[in-house]
Amino acid sequence: MQTISMNKAKNRMERTPHIVTGQFVRINQTPASLGHRMAAQLIDWGIELVWIFAAIWLIGNIDDVVDHTIIKDAAYILLLFIPIMFYSLLWELLNHGQTPGKRLIKLRVVKTDGSMPSLGALIMRWLLWIADGPTMGFLGIFVMLVTRNHQRFGDMAAGTMVIKLGSYNKSSVTLDEFDHLSPDYKPFYPQAADLSLEQVNLITQTLKGAPNDPHVMALAEKVRQVLGITHVRETIAAPHSDQRSENSYHFLERVVRDYQYYALQEV
């Protein structure tokens, strides 16, 4: 594997929408207020209303030239039912968590950790609009008023929240906050910058166990292979099992520290 350029770590962080999560950068997300969310919803409803009138007009013209029930039914489904029924789901899925209304008000749907919601999460919050919306007397409005992050039922079930873009506070972590990273810290494994945050979290969780845990040795070997590390400062292939375990543990610790070092350079 080639030596890592710092751009890879930067690009990986930029893929999370406006928020870098984990222990390297702290961002206090600003939940969208009820007023902002209602304003965005009113805009979306206005767009949907315009679409409904346009679709009805178009379907009426189809009725004048086509005398076929199947075609008329297909027109209602394609032009009226699907766009209105799946309006928010499709927009948020295809437009990075934003409907036109949210985009105009500068809001976005994100996971509570700041990452982009998965398809499953978006479907969950869309389905629970039945409980949050008009069918239940807009119960979601009351729930948003009493929840800390102004989440409705759909958000809580999906693990999402709506944030106000441009209003979050970003606090960069410095080297002083890591007792193992001194200002003159020198990384040994530049390949560590290639790790994803999920992989680093997995290594960190493994390191919470005992140094002689067989999972430590197995993970250390896997990390070495994945990163293409041919020269290991703490030799994994030590003659005795206990020594191999200890060396593997130190190797993983060093990889995590080096990753932290490179991640901090991008803050």
Image (spheres, rainbow, N blue to C red):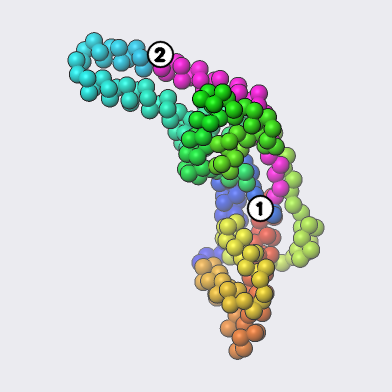
Task: Report the residue that reaches farthest toward the top.
Answer: 64
Judging by the rendered image, the residue that carries numbered circle 1 is 22
Question: Principal SS element in the magenta part?
Answer: helix
Q: Are marks 1 and 2 in contact (CB under 8 Å)?
A: no
Q: What are the residue bounds of the magenta stretch?
A: 25-54
Residue depicted at 58% across the width and 57% down the height:
198
Give the x, y percent position of residue 101.
55, 25
Q: Is residue 72 above or below residue 8?
A: above
Q: Earlier in the sequence, mark 1 or mark 2?
A: 1
In the rendered image, residue 31 lying in the magenta stretch gets the answer yes
Quadrant location of residue 111?
A: top right
State whether residue 89 appears in this view: yes
Judging by the rendered image, the residue that carries numbered circle 2 is 53
Residue depicted at 27% across the width and 22% down the height:
73
- Side of 176 relative to 264 (left or right): right
Residue type highlighted by circle 2: Phe
Residue type highlighted by circle 1: Gly
Instruction: Tell me the CA gap for discs 1 and 2.
Output: 47 Å
